[in-house]
Image (cartoon, rainbow, N blue to C red):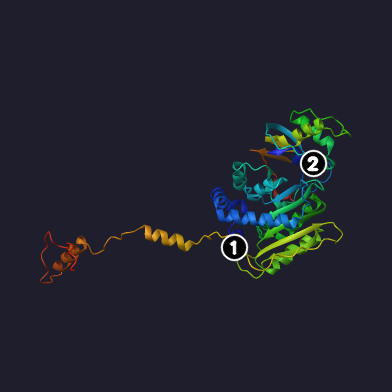
Amino acid sequence: MVRLITHNLLACHVKGCTSNNFPLEFKDVQVELRDAEFNSDFLRGFIPKIEWKALVDAARQVGNTSLPLELPEMLDDDFLKSLHHVLLEIHVEEGSMTCPNCHHVYPISNGIPNMLLAEHEIG
Amino acid sequence: MSRPELQAPPEIYYGDVEAKKYTKNTRNQQIQADMTYRALELLNLLPDEPAMLLDIGCGSGLSGEILDEEGYIWTGVDIAPSMLEVALEREVEGDLFLQDIGQGFGFRPGSFDGAISVSVLQWLLNAETSHPTSSPPHRLNRFFTTLHSALRNPSRAVFQFYPSSDDQIQLISSIAQKAGFGGGIVVDYPNSKKAKKVFLCLFVGGGGAQQVPQGLDGEVEEDGKARFERRRERERTRSNSGKRKPIKGRDWILKKKELYRKRGKESVPRDSKFTGRKRKPVF
């Protein structure tokens, strides 16, 4: 149940891993699509928080290419619909996420990523 | 009052059995729901503005369900895999993470519009190993600093918890303050033994303009539901077991007579088909 909306907020939290630790890279993912309620107010409010490039890359990694490379200035309904689909309806069920900096692997099983760290990795 | 946090670490205490039990218990559900609503109230979010919330120690999603109902998008973290499994079965909408909050969060700055946590913080007050990163102050510090950066400015975080002493409240609020939070403790129904609830209400930013909300006071509202009492259950099982078998039946009489004869006692009546029969009521 990792949706791309949370993936876009998630950085690595291993001790000393403070730069270049975002975004985590998906590997061997299995995705599931589940409908969610469309809420354009929420999306409009959330857009400033999005790291756009990371979102587009993550969407490509799970096989969705509906988003433009640059965040468009005009937010029309079609765009919001596809953004809604990418952010809230794509669930990553299995696979793993790897930190680009320290290469810590966070396994995802049954839709729940395991964020636990070993003792020497705790900051 | 029993304190599960003293028995075992959360991921072990809330194993498969306990996780199911906890979630099924209607009284737990009621309490969780009440506290979630109260925490949302203290969070003081703008109405009609869908927010992104963090549920710390989401467990089986009892509070998450309420967040769903209220239309929030949320992310939950918990350390007990069994609880998360129950949450999956209950099909809550939020994203779930298996995470030890004492190890800190990795969320980007400003990710969330608020955070709630029901009955969790007391679990952070016990050291599981002697490693320095396992000491409660270190874990609390890591938790509050990473949480502070993950929250938007301005925003709030509300924690309901069960402190066992004033020292614990002191420790938690001083570490939270060092991490940059404003705010303080809100106590609901401070004079009631049962209904007393402690909330830690923390503010991010706002330039000190935010006031710590007032705790609820006065009479506790009764919801008209009968409370669970073990006494009733005990009484029911006692009456259910019904007819007790008489101890001094025919077998007992025969056994005794046999014993007396063996001892050489005189005038023990002989055994017949009438031995130990039931007499008619005299009147």
Label 1: how many Cα within 10 Å (few below 14, some 14–19, many 20+): few
Label 2 sits on a secondary structure element that is helix
Q: Is residue A19 left or right of residue B31?
A: right
**The one of A122 and B198 positioned closer to us in this rendering:** B198
Question: Relative to residue B114, is residue B222 depicted above or below?
Answer: below
Image-quadrant location for residue B126: bottom right
Q: Residue B68's spot in the image, x, y percent?
A: 68, 45
Question: Relative to residue B147, is residue B280 depicted above or below?
Answer: below
Q: Chain of mark 2?
A: A
Label 2: how many Cα within 10 Å (few below 14, some 14–19, many 20+): few
Q: Is residue B16 left or right of residue A123?
A: left
Image-quadrant location for residue B276: bottom left
**The label number, if any, that marks residue B222 in the structure image:** 1
**The one of B146 and B132 positioned closer to us in this rendering:** B146
**Residue at x-position 65% and y-position 62%:** B162
| Residue closest to the far bottom | B266
Label 1 sits on a secondary structure element that is loop
Q: Which three-letter amino acid code belongs to the residue tagged 2?
A: Asp
Question: Relative to residue B52, is residue B233 depicted above or below?
Answer: below
Q: Residue B69's spot in the image, x, y percent?
A: 67, 46
Residue topped by disc 2: A41
Q: Residue B210's spot in the image, x, y percent?
A: 82, 60
Q: Chain of mark 1?
A: B
Q: Is residue B118 in sight in this rendering?
A: no
**Residue at x-position 60% and y-position 61%:** B6
- Check the picture and name the quadrant holding the N terminus of chain B: bottom right
**The one of B251 and A85 positioned closer to us in this rendering:** A85
Image-quadrant location for residue B121: bottom right
- Check the picture and name the quadrant holding the C terminus of chain B: bottom left
